Image: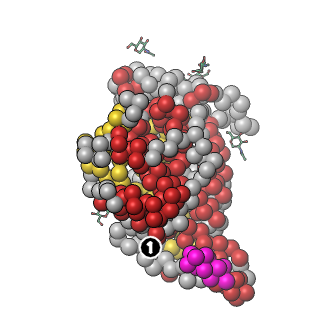
Amino acid sequence: MARLLGVSLLVAGLGCVLLVVPSESAADDVSALLAFKKAIFEDPLAKLSDWNSKDENPCGWTGVGCSPFDNRVVTLELTNSSLKGFLALEIESLSSLQKLILDHNTLMGPIPKGIGKLRNLIMLNLSTNQLDGPIPIEIGEMPKISKIDLRANRLDGAIPPEIGNLTSLTELQLSNNSLTGTIPGSNDSSMVSTNSDGQIGLCRLTQLTDMDLSYNYLVGDVPTCFTQIRRLSLVGNCFENNDTTNRPDNQCENSQRGNESSRVDGNQQKSFQQPLWLLILEVITAISLLTVLTLCTIAGLRRCKARSSRNSGTWTRAISWKENTVISIDDDLLANVPKISRQELAEACEDFSNIIGSTHDTVVYKGTMKDGSEIAVVSLSASVHYWTSYVELYFQKEASGRNGKIES
Ligand SMILES: *[C@@H]1O[C@H](CO)[C@@H](O)[C@H](O)[C@H]1NC(C)=O
Ligand SMILES: *[C@@H]1O[C@H](CO)[C@@H](O)[C@H](O)[C@H]1NC(C)=O
Ligand SMILES: *[C@@H]1O[C@H](CO)[C@@H](O)[C@H](O)[C@H]1NC(C)=O
Ligand SMILES: *[C@@H]1O[C@H](CO)[C@@H](O)[C@H](O)[C@H]1NC(C)=O
Ligand SMILES: *[C@@H]1O[C@H](CO)[C@@H](O)[C@H](O)[C@H]1NC(C)=O
Ligand SMILES: *[C@@H]1O[C@H](CO)[C@@H](O)[C@H](O)[C@H]1NC(C)=O
Ligand SMILES: *[C@@H]1O[C@H](CO)[C@@H](O)[C@H](O)[C@H]1NC(C)=O
């Protein structure tokens, strides 16, 4: 109710802004930045504390820079700021953005495809985070981009040949990820068609002076055009040449010789590379969280309270989420996810007596289900403040995405 009121106040507020400031897009910047803030669930240095939803002008906010001509946001720079969270899809609305610099944080999840809508972007620096999934092919739609730095993340899949469209690119840093497949433009790459000047893939990047593809799992050969690049590093890959700078053979066994099939969905590749126990742990985390949340939503507060009175504090805390947050459940997404009731979990885990591990905010229990299968249950406590619908949906997506794998 309070939230609804807040939203309508915000809408009313934006309405007023629109009357005063003719540019609708400046208001889009504010809502995009607020969405960015919402997707960050840990900000221990309080960098975003002055990002106030009542402000109609974000230009004074920490890390935000505006154009003096039209007050549009042109830079978002929060280097090394201990931010933990996701990259909100809404950043695609920052249509005047020229610099997006968020390196040395703990950003997780995928790079949003909408990044390709940032047609004015000149510099993209997301290095040293924990971003995963493939590099979106939409990255090839930013005509002005000059520097891309995605090094030291967990990106997988192939290097999209669309990067070859970025003719203004001078620097490309992709080292220390888990990229696979061939380099677009190499003899082995699947691209056969050439453009007018006969160059393909990354060989079309005539402005490129700095490129680092080191410490990935790239295969095939190195395009001959790379001899033109002034600063180039390719060490720690799985190239065809028997070069000593390659990874040792045993690290390369899993990286197939790339062809068309190397361009598969990043999610699929990731789940093959992850150890099974980690996968199961993640699924169980998601399922147990979901179970608690779903139970609380469906069964209602009173019943939850009655049940939890017999149980440990961890679960009691979970119930308070219901009191304070709106929980969004995506039914379609979860259609195939088995739901284990908390009671079933409690029985399987002998009332959560069998603790097999813990970190400062999680406890892992071992249990045996009625059908004999062994499970690990992760109980995770998060402050209500950090448990946003964004995080919620992320866990739901993880659970639904991996469900098929634990059953097999
Ligand atoms: C990040 O900030 C911390 C403390 O503020 C500092 O010690 C560290 O050197 C910084 N790291 C980088 C890469 O700038
Ligand atoms: C990205 O940020 C890091 C740390 O601030 C910096 O060392 C690196 O040079 C930046 N990348 C580019 C392409 O400017
Ligand atoms: C971008 O690159 C892809 C693959 O290299 C190509 O098919 C596409 O036509 C290019 N788009 C533009 C606008 O150049
Ligand atoms: C990349 O990985 C190499 C080898 O593991 C390591 O020496 C280097 O420090 C890493 N670089 C970054 C930027 O993380
Ligand atoms: C790629 O193919 C060309 C022509 O077919 C050949 O001259 C060149 O040596 C090949 N490059 C590599 C690295 O194999
Ligand atoms: C690389 O080494 C393997 C054995 O270690 C050999 O079978 C293969 O022919 C070599 N390839 C080249 C291109 O030298
Ligand atoms: C590409 O990969 C698929 C599946 O791994 C394989 O069947 C096919 O023969 C490969 N094609 C080439 C040209 O290597």
Residue 63 or residue 302, whichever sits in front: 302
Residue 330 in picture, x, y percent from top left: 60, 53
For the residue marked with disc 1, what is the amino acid? Leu
Q: Which residue is mark 1?
A: 48
The reply to whether residue 211 is in sight is no
Percent across and percent down for residue 246 are 38, 28
Rendering coords of residue 81 (x, y %): 38, 65
Q: Residue at x 62, y 27 (%)?
A: 260
Quick check: 79 above or below 53? above
Image height of 317 relative to 179, above or below: below
Residue drawn where x is 55% and y is 83% of the image: 54
Tell me the element at label 1: loop
Residue 39 lies within the magenta run: no
Is 226 in front, or is 185? 185
Residue 381 located left or right of residue 399: left
Q: Residue at x 46, y 43 (%)?
A: 340
204 up-or-down from 259: above or below: below
Q: Is 317 located above or below residue 213 in the figure?
A: below
Compared across the picture, whether 146 is left or right of 293 comes to right
Q: For this view, does 384 lie left or right of residue 188?
A: left
The stretch in magenta equals 1-12
Does residue 45 appear anywhere in the picture? yes
